[in-house]
């Protein structure tokens, strides 16, 4: 059984329309069918197209359809490739975002640990300052109780506690030898200072503006320095204060506390001032770290005879 080609036109001559029989008299004529929309000439042209042309036309239509399908598939592939490329970029961006998030979380954790450490140090310093303030108040109270006298004044300024002792308690006029009454005052002071071993102490000497010209003291500078050193040596050698806590300073007549125009004012200016410095606060790391002097101690100083060979010996 042969298959029919859908593109082949029907073969054979078309059947002629039968001539309608003549109508009998008295009968109504039958209606004539409407002519075909295709003109007879056009139909004849279609009928005369060779079968091979129809085959070629069919192949062309098929190829056109395949081309359209292929183009559609190519466009779909391009769209898929673009989507895969964008997905790959999104994956890279997501990976970078995750790494950045991890780094941020790590930095945040480190910052939180640092904040916690700093807060602990701040709390420790706060407690130390509160303890120092309490100790300062205790020191001042004990000094006032032990050294209450009209010739001794105690004042506090910016953490410094100053004990001013008039010279008439400690020294005779124009002298730098401590009297027994002054020794008793310094012993009481040392007993109080012994309870506060972390406080540094400055011993300062002051005079009035009356000039002094003696063999021992050519000026008030020498007199104030000798008196400060005499008080310092007594605190170390007789009262047991550690020497690393002490320093001597001489101001002469140049830091008066009263007017030198009157005898009363000059008496107030002739004094020894014991200045107790505030305690120095250090962070825990600084407190435990060795000082530069501890790490590399300085060599002992050379003697005068070593530095200057021409210098005479002490026995000469």
Image (spheres, rainbow, N blue to C red):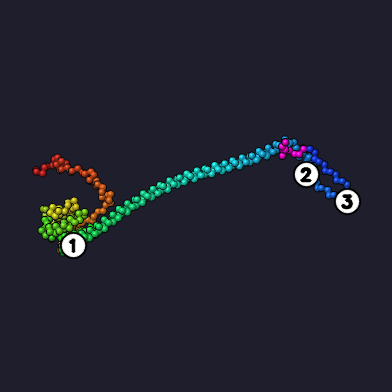
What kind of element bears circle 1?
A: helix
Position of residue 65 measured from the top left corner of the image (x, y, whole percent): 65, 40
Magenta stretch?
Answer: 1-11
Residue appearing at x 17%, y 55% in the figure: 194
Q: Which residue position holds label 2?
A: 38
Image quarter where the N terminus lies is top right
Q: Examine the structure image and report whether residue 313 is included in the region drawn in magenta.
A: no
Q: Which residue position holds label 3?
A: 27
Q: Which residue position holds label 1?
A: 144
Contact (Cβ within 8 Å) of mark 3 with mark 1: no
* 57 is higher (above) or lower (below) than 105: above
Marked residue nearer the N-terminal end (2 or 3):
3
Magenta segment, prevailing SS (helix, strand or loop):
loop
Gap in angstroms between the C-alphas marked 2 and 3: 32 Å
Rendered image: mark on residue 284: none
What kind of element bears circle 3?
A: loop
Residue 260 appears in the rendering? no
* 23 is higher (above) or lower (below) than 4: below
Gap in angstroms between the C-alphas marked 3 and 1: 160 Å
């Amino acid at each position: 059984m042969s298959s029919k080609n859908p593109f082949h036109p029907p073969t054979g001559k078309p059947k002629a329309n039968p001539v309608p029989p003549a109508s009998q008299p008295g009968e109504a004529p039958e209606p004539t069918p409407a002519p075909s929309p295709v003109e007879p000439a056009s139909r004849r042209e279609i009928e005369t197209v060779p079968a091979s042309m129809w085959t070629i036309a069919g192949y062309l239509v098929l190829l056109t359809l395949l081309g359209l399908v292929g183009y559609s598939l190519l466009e779909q592939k391009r769209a898929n490739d673009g989507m895969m490329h964008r997905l790959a970029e999104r994956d890279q961006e997501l990976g970078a975002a995750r790494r950045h998030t991890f780094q941020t979380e790590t930095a945040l954790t480190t910052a939180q640990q640092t904040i916690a450490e700093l807060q602990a140090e701040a709390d420790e310093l706060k407690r130390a300052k509160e303890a120092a303030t309490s100790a300062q108040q205790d020191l001042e109270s004990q000094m006032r109780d032990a050294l209450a006298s009209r010739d001794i004044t105690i004042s506090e300024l910016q953490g410094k506690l100053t004990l001013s002792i008039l010279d008439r308690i400690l020294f005779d006029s124009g002298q730098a030898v401590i009297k027994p009454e002054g020794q008793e005052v310094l012993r009481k002071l040392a007993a109080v200072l012994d309870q506060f071993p972390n406080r540094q102490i400055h011993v300062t000497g002051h005079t009035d503006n009356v000039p002094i010209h003696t063999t021992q003291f050519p000026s008030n500078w020498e007199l104030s320095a000798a008196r400060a050193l005499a008080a310092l040596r007594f605190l170390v050698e007789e009262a047991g204060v550690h020497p690393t806590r002490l320093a001597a300073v001489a101001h002469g007549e140049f830091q008066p506390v009263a007017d030198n125009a009157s005898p009363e004012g000059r008496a107030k200016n002739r004094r020894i001032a014991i200045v107790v410095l505030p305690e120095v606060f250090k962070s825990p790391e600084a407190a435990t770290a060795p000082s530069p002097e501890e790490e590399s101690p300085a060599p002992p100083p050379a003697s005068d005879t070593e530095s200057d060979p021409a210098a005479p010996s002490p026995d000469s």
